[in-house]
Amino acid sequence: APAAAPSELFALTQAVAAELHTLYDGGTDKAPPFGHFAHFHFSPATALKLSRIFGNEHALSVTRAAAAAAEKKYLVRLRALDFLDTDGTKLEWSELTSTVSIDKTGRKVSGVARWPALAISGKQHHLSLRDMRFSTHHTHEIGGMTFGRTDASVADLSWNPSNTSTPIQFEDMRASTVMLRRGKVADLDYRVSVKSATFDGERFDGIHLALRMLNLDPKTMGVAGREIQSLNVAGQTQEEQVASMLLLFNRDGADAVRKGATLVFDDWSASYHGNKFSVKGRIGFDKAARPGRTRDSVLESFMKIVAHFDVRVPVALLRDFAAAVPRNVPGGEQPVSGAAAALAARDKADALIAKAVGDGYARLVNGELRSAIDFKGGKLSFNGKHFPLPGE
């Protein structure tokens, strides 16, 4: 098959990012220079592309607004778009509006933004988001590190990955990120909630994910942030950018773990047919085995991971899910309908539960299947019983 045409909008985004990057005079230690942008003109080539795609070369506008004496305030707008890209992707979005306030030092920033609608349609997929909102209050520090809080929400999201299946739908999605300095290290608190999510007709409610990354090195994170920003102006293709981003994440993630970072899962839970499962735990690195500046192989690093998780799943949830899987998996077993189908699913789930409990990998407590999962020294165990991994 012939190679897909490159995205014209992606190329324009790179050109805009590269030209705006020249406005930065304080590096990443300060807020973006919105005041400079108000008088900025893109190169003739980029202005022409903006006019062709947006109908106006001033697709992104920044204007000064009235503010308190100790701060500067800007109104930022991104024009609405209705565009068929050269790669066959149809993009439609409404005007994005934002207000940004910056203190006199240029380091403390607060802002709010709203984007009413966004839709992306390709030959094989469709994505739409409605009523997106964003707010942030943070401080830029020397070295490129940013501390503060950011909140985002989406009223609903619909994703159809094949245009032939039932869309995956999310309702009332909310996320928050808080970065705090604690002495010489930094802690990241990340939380996500979804009121409901529907997959192929099956609905999950009250989805929550709350995790913290502790003992992060601010210097390393500042360098990583600058490197990620530089990818936007590096002139790479979309595929090359993704590959570069993955390399950075792998490198910086491994470095963070080696320096003592710990990932804590405070809550991962959801309800299915009124029954809630939950997972809590943490992932760290064996302090006794953690190296200094040496770089281990992937296998050596894997062997030094220390993890613990507590899992609770209601038996009723397992029974309901067992009944749903066959009718939603292409080519899956098709049980008879009605009471016989419910009984078959119940028997299947009960057999799996009995085996897990009988083999010592889980406990049955108050209608819940519970297990403590541990990984240390390359060994995995459930409920204190060793579970052999491939190759053992």
Image (cartoon, rainbow, N blue to C red):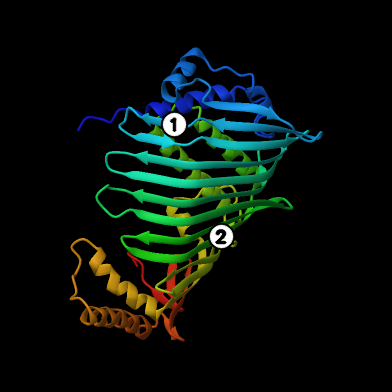
The quarter holding residue 30 reads top right
Rounded to the nearest angstrom, the CA distance separating label 2 from label 1 is 36 Å
Q: Nearer the viewer, residue 58 or 366?
A: 58
- Total marks in image: 2
**Which of pointers 2 and 1 lies earlier in the amino acid sequence?**
1
Please determine whether, in this image, residue 171 is positioned above or below residue 203. above
Relative to 44, say whether 368 is above or below. below
What is the quadrant of the N terminus in the image? top left
Q: Is residue 55 above or below residue 193?
A: above
Circle 1 residue: 81
Q: Which quarter of the figure has residue 87? A: top left
Secondary structure of residue under mark 1: strand
What's the residue type where badge 2 is placed? Answer: Leu
Task: Residue at the far top: name it.
Answer: 44
- Tell me what residue is drawn at x 61 percent, y 19 percent: 40
Q: Nearer the viewer, mark 2 or mark 1?
A: 1
Residue at image mark 2: 211
* Label 2 packing within 10 angstroms: few (<14), some (14-19), many (20+): many
Residue 370 is labelled as none
